[in-house]
Image: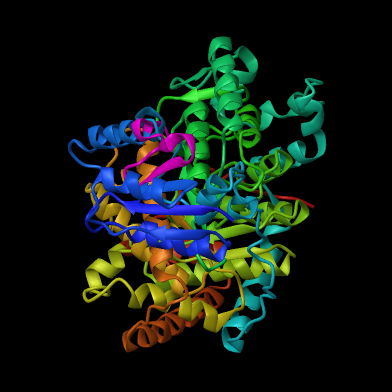
Amino acid sequence: MSRVLLAPLDPVHDIGLKMIARGLEQAGHETVLLPPDLTPEEIVSQALKQGAETLLVGRTLGYGVAELLARFIDLADAAGLRTTARIGIGGMAVRRELAAELGFDAGFGPGTSVEEVRCFVERREYVPDPTRTHKEKADMTAGYDYRYRHAGIAGKLATISAMIEDWARVRTSPGVERARLRDELWDAARWRAREGDGALYEHYPALCGEVPQRYYATGELHPKTRRFTKEEVAGLESYLAETKARMSVLKLQHSRRKPLVFNQYGTGCPFMDIGHILASEAWGADGVVHFDPSWGARTEGFLDGFLTHQEDGTVITPANLNRIGAGLEKSTLWQVRAHRGLNTPETVVLAAKLGADLTKINICYGALGAGTDPARLTVDGYNAILYAKKYNLPFDVVTNEELAGVPAYKAFAGMLIVADLAVRLGARPILQPLFAYSPEVMIHGLMEDNYIDFNAAKVMALRGIVNAPIWPGAPIGFLTHTEDRVQSAMSTALHACLAAALEVDAISIASTDEAYSGGPISAPAKVDTLRAVQEGFRFLGQAGIAPTAAADAAAAKLVEGIEGVLDAVIKEGDFVAALHDGALGSREEGAYPGRAGKDTVRTVG
């Protein structure tokens, strides 16, 4: 047991000292808390008189306070107190470095635990509790059986899935053939050991478009892309080694286990991406999402090499994914998107072989909102799902076509079609409704009163249909964000709280500059949002957010609309034709059947 004197050098800010005193008493120490109106001379005198072994001083720093504290130490030295007692200083602006500079034996700033102070009092080294920061990868699909709660919709989806299977399994495409080569001929372990690519590139270039063919024939890269230099690679390795040596991670969640929080990266530069990922991990992100350039999604085949690109979106190559994946913390979930372009099935294979945990596949969004021919993406998406099953890679089914103007009920019908097909093929889909101020919402005034009801209705509707994991995105709060970083962070945090209250499994968040950035998104802007979400989770705890009755009505309307869309697809009798004819999103609503990969599908067998 030690005798501890606690002395506020501030007329009102002694709350921290009272909390510390209570904790030390519970640990068996004798504490004396002095009143807040004593002078420094009187505090030193009391410490000597009462035989204090530790003196803890609390003070909110302000103008001239550093000089005051330095004089306090001089006074303690002159009185001989330092020979019998150790002196610590705490307060909102205190840092260890400042405390040491002023001559104190320890400094305790914001976030200090009682255990840290107890160790100081007991002259023990403080070892942070590893359980506070220990994180493990979570399986979002665990505990979900994908059983339908809405028999009518289940029956309609079964009919459509059978329709897609019958159509897709007798067709192929260059993308499917490249994925087969990558699956059969490319060994990631041998490639990492610099033992080559096997026989992959004997056949691969012939299945590629013009840009990759030139690369494999002459070494010429995409015009906005270049290789990293040896010096840059050495710099990256040095940066990674130095940063990893002092790396620790936060947990954003307070008293709830979920939602997991994902942050997107894709500056074009893998080196900068790695820096952003490290910042995201340090500030609590549970997962990161690889964002590739739009031209890459519309190009047949991948380039190779460690490449940087001068515009948004980081080029998918084996070397780029391998470098990024190797820099991740062990607890970080890594998603590589495969949902929208001509490399969808090969992306799944490549990502899985390089250690990704998740991918993203949605035939409807890729065909109606991302520029890929519906027939091409149907056969590619079907095969991508088969590879996701083979490599045990869960994937979300995003509904970003809502951002083009497609009504939520149509986007949801498309999402459920892909999810049902996936379950029937043995894969593990995750439903990803938008939490966004979408064009449909704006035009029809669906969020005039609040941002809660319509977003909640989406989750309620999906839960009424099927028992499946839900991961709102992408990102949450999209189109509610402005160029005001405080507003943007707060909007994200409020949507995160709603997602937590609805007990969804994960969320994707944006950085605070994502809504207006004309260039690369910055790491501080990512930290802004992560900090805001952490504060939101702390604020909410186990409390709830209650939607109004309007949410129930909106959920019922969504389910009714989904049934109508599924009926229309069944009536069409051809899923690809239904995509072209607007059943899942029309031109008037902002959806346009894509053209990339048109006429590249052929029948087999």
- The answer to whether residue 129 is left or right of residue 496 is right
Instruction: Please state the extent of the stretch shown in magenta in the rendering.
Output: 77-98
Q: Is residue 248 above or below residue 152?
A: above
> Is 81 part of what is drawn in magenta?
yes
> Is 145 part of what is drawn in magenta?
no
Q: Residue furthest left?
A: 63
Q: Quadrant of residue 303?
A: top right
Q: Is residue 105 above or below residue 419?
A: above
The image's colour scheme reads: rainbow
**Residue sitting at 63 percent across and 63 percent down?**
140
Quadrant of the image for the N terminus? bottom right
The spot of residue 557 in percent (x, y) is 39, 84
Q: Quadrant of residue 14?
A: bottom left
The spot of residue 32 in percent (x, y) is 41, 59
| Residue 142 visible, this angle | yes
Front residue (pair 193, 94)? 94
Front residue (pair 20, 541)? 20
- The answer to whether residue 123 is left or right of residue 513 is right
| Residue 214 visible, this angle | no
Q: Is residue 259 above or below residue 549?
A: above
The spot of residue 382 in percent (x, y) is 66, 57
**Residue sitting at 46 percent across and 69 percent down?**
500
The spot of residue 499 in percent (x, y) is 44, 68
Front residue (pair 29, 137)? 29
**Residue sitting at 66 percent across and 77 percent down?**
158
Q: Residue furthest front?
A: 49
Q: Quadrant of residue 449?
A: bottom left
Q: Count all numbered tags in the image, as a single digit.
A: 0
Q: Is residue 260 above or below residue 518?
A: below
